[in-house]
Amino acid sequence: MLCIPEHIALQLGLETESEREVTLADGRNLKVPYVGPVRVTFDGRICFVGALVLGDEVLLGAVPMEDMDLVIAPGRRAVTVNPESPNIPHARVK
């Protein structure tokens, strides 16, 4: 999931659509605002997703990364477009 801090949600003028229950890494459960849609762009690719409002930094998450067909390049410590589909995002639909 995309996670954004509260100050960014306020700056973007995003209204709370609902609440979601999340489990944090330490095992605590919280109810947090769910806002959107948020337009996310990366290296010429685009997606629209909802966002959980929590934390103090933006976390891109697997949902928008998959939607834009991005991959992690651990050797370079970077996120890049999928080299198997460099020109346009590819999606597996079954």
Image: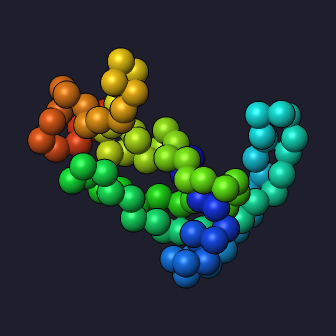
Identified at 25% across, 37% down, the residue is 81
Q: Nearer the viewer, residue 54 or 33?
A: 54
Compared with 83, 69 (above or below) is below
* In the displayed structure image, the side of residue 57 where residue 49 appears, left or right: left
The image shows residue 10 at horizontal and vertical percentages of 61, 77
* In the displayed structure image, the side of residue 86 where residue 38 appears, left or right: right
- The residue lying furthest to the left in this view is 87
Identified at 18% across, 26% down, the residue is 84
How many numbered markers are drawn? 0
Which quarter of the image is occupied by the C terminus?
top left
Identified at 39% across, 39% down, the residue is 66
Identified at 71% across, 65% down, the residue is 33
Compared with 31, 33 (above or below) is below
Residue 34: quarter of image: bottom right
Colour scheme: rainbow
The image shows residue 13 at horizontal and vertical percentages of 55, 81
Residue 7 seen from this side: yes
Q: Nearer the viewer, residue 2 or 76?
A: 76
* In the displayed structure image, the side of residue 20 where residue 81 appears, left or right: left
Residue 17 seen from this side: no
The image shows residue 52 at horizontal and vertical percentages of 64, 57
- The residue lying furthest to the bottom in this view is 13
Compared with 57, 77 (above or below) is above
Residue 6: quarter of image: bottom right
- The residue lying furthest to the top in this view is 75
The image shows residue 51 at horizontal and vertical percentages of 57, 59
- The residue lying furthest to the right in this view is 28
